[in-house]
Structure formats: structure tokens, C-alpha cells
Image: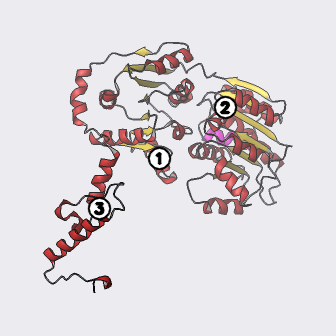
């Protein structure tokens, strides 16, 4: 089957050809005709199945065919996404598909100044791709309205649920005309998403492609049983021995991602972190460096990884196993995209077998365990200077000591503890140290007498 068989107009098929699309994927085959007929859609689709094109193509075609191209632009379509990265990726696809349609889109997300977003809306756009938080801010400021929305898409609805956005989503939906076409896409279908679909969809067509319990056969999965202290050394060893050129590494926490990047840099492996604490500019720069090959290793948390779409990604490494089994499938789905093969490697601490057992039970099969000679890792481990966690008060003491002026460092003065912070004794000691320092460095120094001493 070709895109022409789906009754897609020539202006869009021409753009699809330029983008390298040869034939539609299963979700596109099932979704596009239903959406062109104006039906609501509830779709569960595994990441990497082409779902963005499944909703973007019919939306663009319907806007183009009904649009008065001489009138001012109105926001006719709204796509809600959980993350900034996914919003940018969806916007890029809309731009590619609408190359010959004169339909404009813009992105709205937090973490950056809203000035550019305001200016874009004032100039006029047809499609808005947004994260819920920033969109609500602009709605409350009356910078835009949603009175002309005809098409609403909730992309990665399960992730929006996990991130606590559902209440914001419902507030936004309540400001959109009920006479609209609604599409809900989710990799998983928990009860909350089923309930949400009943609230916002009307007699939807139900599509399920690549169920979440089935991982892609093209992905070669394996696991190393390795203690936490040897994980970084093992990763370094695999990167070098397997000549890894493009690796997406998942950690459970933001601090873990930062710490891993520092350790990799110690052994001259270029890597960058991407997580929620990074600014939008920093996240975009890291992602672009990774896509261009400037950086070989991208270390990400799960939230930041949503929306990372990289062609020909060779390796995904689960440095930390996810606590939710379904997340494992989302992670490894970043490789093996578009019919290409991929390799997913996981590290599992033998002392914590529960997470691995849950994942294997969820996917319905055992993951191949690879034996490794850990004696080889000892020199690597020793070459990486461990980043230890000193007691918090000790770190603060050393930092405060470094910030002290010279006169307070005289005679080994130490910063005050919380207990004696306001103590008069401490103040007297500090004053005495100051006087002694001045007398030592300035022979003409004289102590000024207070009025009370006169």
C-alpha cells in the first residue's frame, strides 16, 4: 500500500517523498482514513511506529481543504505533549509535511522566555503544539484563545498522566469547542486513560498497534548482572570494545546522570546529560550534538527522553533499570526504529533482582544474561576518580572556609555552627581575630573606641 491509496492529496505526498517516506506504517494505514472521515480516535501505539504522521497528515489535509487562504490565520489545531522535546519533534514533522500547504505551526512550552511564543501567535498560526503548563499560562494571560480549535490531539497521554498534567489537560479541554475532532494517543492504556477517553472522545475508533507487552523483534536485548560500584567501568569497557558510536544511556535520577557524565569525561569519553533540571537551550544543544555525532553518549532520564527521535540509534543502555516495567519498553524502543535493528543492554544489580524479574514477566520472556570477566574492569574502575558524597555539613564547612576573607582565616578561625550562630562569644572571637589581623598587616591601625567607652 502507498500513501496515494489513503486518499492523501498530492501536495502532502510530495512532501512525504522528500522526507524519505515510501509506504505507510500499520498505524497510519488504520488511523488516516478514519481521521479523514472526521471520526474521533483512541490509539495505543508503541513508540517509533509513525503515530505523529498518523494524526498530522489528516489534520493538515483537512485544514488545507477547508481553509480560506486570504483570511487571517486562526489556531485550528492543538497538539498537547508531555515534554518540550516531543513538542519540538512534532512541530518539525508538521513543518516537513506542510512544505507545500502554506500552513504554519508554532511550539509553546516552559523553561524559556514566552516573548518569542507571544510574537509567533500574534503573527498568526494554524497549528499549536504545546505542553500543558505554559499553554495554561498564556490562556490565563489572554495572550491566545482556543475558540477556533477544530482538531485536538493528546499525544503520549500516559506520560502526561505520570507527570501529573491530566488536571491541566482537562482545564484546557474545557476551553475548546465541543464541536471538534479529538485524537488520543497513548503507548499504554491504564484505567485513568480509559476514563479520560470517555470524557473527551465521542464514539471513537479504537486502534491498537504493537501492544506494549510486545517488544520489537529487531532489538537484540541482553543484561549484565553487575554491582552498582562496577557499572561505570562496565559501560566504559563496552563502549570501547564494541566501538559504540551512538549510545543513549538511561539513569533513574538527574544526579545520577550528572555523576555518570563526569565519570565518563574522566576517561575521555565525550558525553552530555539531558534531564529536567537543564535549561531548554542546554537540552536542545545536547540533543543536537548527539544527533550530529559530536557527542557519542547522551545520558538521559526518562522524562527528558520522551520525544527523542534519532534515526539509526545503535545502542540503548539501561544503566539503571526502570522501576516501572512499561518504561523499559519505551526506553529500548528508541533503537530499532523505522525497521532498523538495534541493541538494548541493561545493567542489573544482583542484589536487586526484583526489577529485572518484573520486566521479564511483563514482556513475557527472559532477557539473555551475558557473563563478563569483571577482573578486567578493576583497572578501569581505579582510573575513574570516584565522586564520593561527603557529609553535608562537612561540604558546607569546607566551602564556607574557602569563602572566608583572610582576617577570618587568621588563627584557623572556623565558621560558626548553627548552634552558636547568634552567640556573643562567637562575635567576640571574630572581632578579636579581625583586630589581630589588622595589627599584623597594618602597623598604623588603631582600634576605634565606641561612644559607650568614651
Quarter of the figure with the C terminus: bottom left
Q: Is residue 255 magenta?
A: no
- Across and down, in percent, residue 417 comes to 32, 55
- Specify the segment rendered in magenta: 12-19
For marks 3 and 1, the one nearer the N-term is 1
Above or below residue 212? Residue 293 is below
Q: Tag 3, which secondary structure? A: helix
Which residue is tagged 1?
288
Q: Is residue 436 left or right of residue 286?
A: left
Q: Quadrant of the N terminus?
A: top right
Q: Read off the residue under disc 2.
A: 186
Please state the horizontal and vertical placement of residue 147, each as a whole percent of the image.
82, 53
- The answer to whether residue 334 shows anywhere in this view is yes
Kindly report the secondary structure that dominates the magenta region of the rendered protein: helix
Give the label, 2 or 3, closer to the camera: 3
SS state under label 1: helix
Q: State the separation of the CA atoms marked 3 and 1.
A: 38 Å
Amino acid at each position: 500500500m502507498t500513501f496515494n491509496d489513503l486518499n492523501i492529496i498530492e501536495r502532502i505526498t510530495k512532501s512525504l517523498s522528500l522526507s524519505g517516506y515510501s509506504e505507510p506504517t500499520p498505524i497510519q494505514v488504520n488511523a488516516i482514513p478514519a481521521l479523514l472521515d472526521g471520526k474521533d480516535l483512541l490509539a495505543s501505539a508503541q513508540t517509533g511506529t509513525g503515530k505523529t504522521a498518523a494524526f498530522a497528515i489528516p489534520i493538515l489535509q483537512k485544514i488545507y481543504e477547508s481553509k480560506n487562504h486570504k483570511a487571517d490565520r486562526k489556531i485550528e489545531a492543538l497538539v498537547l505533549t508531555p515534554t518540550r522535546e516531543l513538542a519540538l519533534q512534532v512541530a518539525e514533522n508538521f513543518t516537513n509535511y506542510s512544505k507545500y500547504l502554506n500552513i504554519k505551526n508554532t511550539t509553546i512550552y516552559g523553561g524559556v522566555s514566552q516573548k518569542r511564543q507571544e510574537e509567533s501567535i500574534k503573527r498568526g498560526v494554524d497549528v499549536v503544539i504545546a505542553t500543558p503548563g505554559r499553554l495554561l499560562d498564556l490562556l490565563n494571560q489572554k495572550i491566545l484563545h482556543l475558540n477556533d480549535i477544530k482538531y485536538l490531539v493528546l499525544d503520549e497521554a500516559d506520560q502526561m498522566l505520570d507527570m501529573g498534567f491530566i488536571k491541566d489537560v482537562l482545564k484546557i479541554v474545557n476551553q475548546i469547542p465541543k464541536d471538534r475532532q479529538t485524537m488520543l494517543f497513548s503507548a499504554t492504556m491504564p484505567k485513568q486513560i480509559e476514563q479520560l477517553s470517555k470524557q473527551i472522545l465521542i464514539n471513537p475508533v479504537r486502534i491498537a498497534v504493537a501492544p506494549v507487552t510486545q517488544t520489537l523483534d529487531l532489538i537484540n536485548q541482553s543484561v549484565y548482572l553487575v554491582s552498582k560500584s562496577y557499572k561505570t567501568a562496565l559501560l566504559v569497557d563496552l563502549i570501547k570494545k564494541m566501538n559504540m558510536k551512538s549510545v543513549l544511556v538511561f539513569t533513574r535520577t538527574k544526579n545520577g546522570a550528572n555523576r555518570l557524565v563526569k565519570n565518563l569525561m574522566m576517561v575521555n569519553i565525550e558525553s552530555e546529560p539531558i534531564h529536567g533540571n537543564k535549561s531548554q537551550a542546554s537540552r536542545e544543544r545536547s540533543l543536537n550534538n548527539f544527533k550530529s555525532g559530536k557527542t557519542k553518549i547522551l545520558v538521559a532520564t526518562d522524562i527528558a527522553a520522551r520525544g527523542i527521535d534519532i534515526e539509526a540509534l545503535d545502542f540503548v543502555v539501561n544503566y539503571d533499570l526502570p522501576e516501572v516495567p512499561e518504561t523499559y519498553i519505551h526506553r529500548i524502543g528508541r533503537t530499532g526504529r523505522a525497521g532498523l535493528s538495534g541493541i538494548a543492554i541493561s545493567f542489573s544489580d544482583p542484589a536487586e533482582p526484583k526489577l529485572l524479574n518484573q520486566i521479564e514477566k511483563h514482556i513475557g520472556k527472559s532477557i539473555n544474561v551475558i557473563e563478563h570477566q569483571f577482573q578486567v574492569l578493576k583497572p578501569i574502575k581505579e582510573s575513574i576518580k570516584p565522586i564520593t558524597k561527603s557529609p553535608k555539613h562537612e561540604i558546607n564547612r569546607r566551602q564556607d572556609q574557602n569563602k572566608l576573607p583572610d582576617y577570618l582565616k587568621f588563627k584557623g578561625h572556623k565558621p560558626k555552627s548553627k548552634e552558636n550562630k547568634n552567640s556573643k562569644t562567637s562575635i567576640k572571637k571574630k572581632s578579636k581575630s579581625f583586630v589581630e589581623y589588622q595589627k599584623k598587616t597594618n602597623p598604623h591601625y588603631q582600634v576605634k573606641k565606641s561612644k559607650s567607652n568614651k
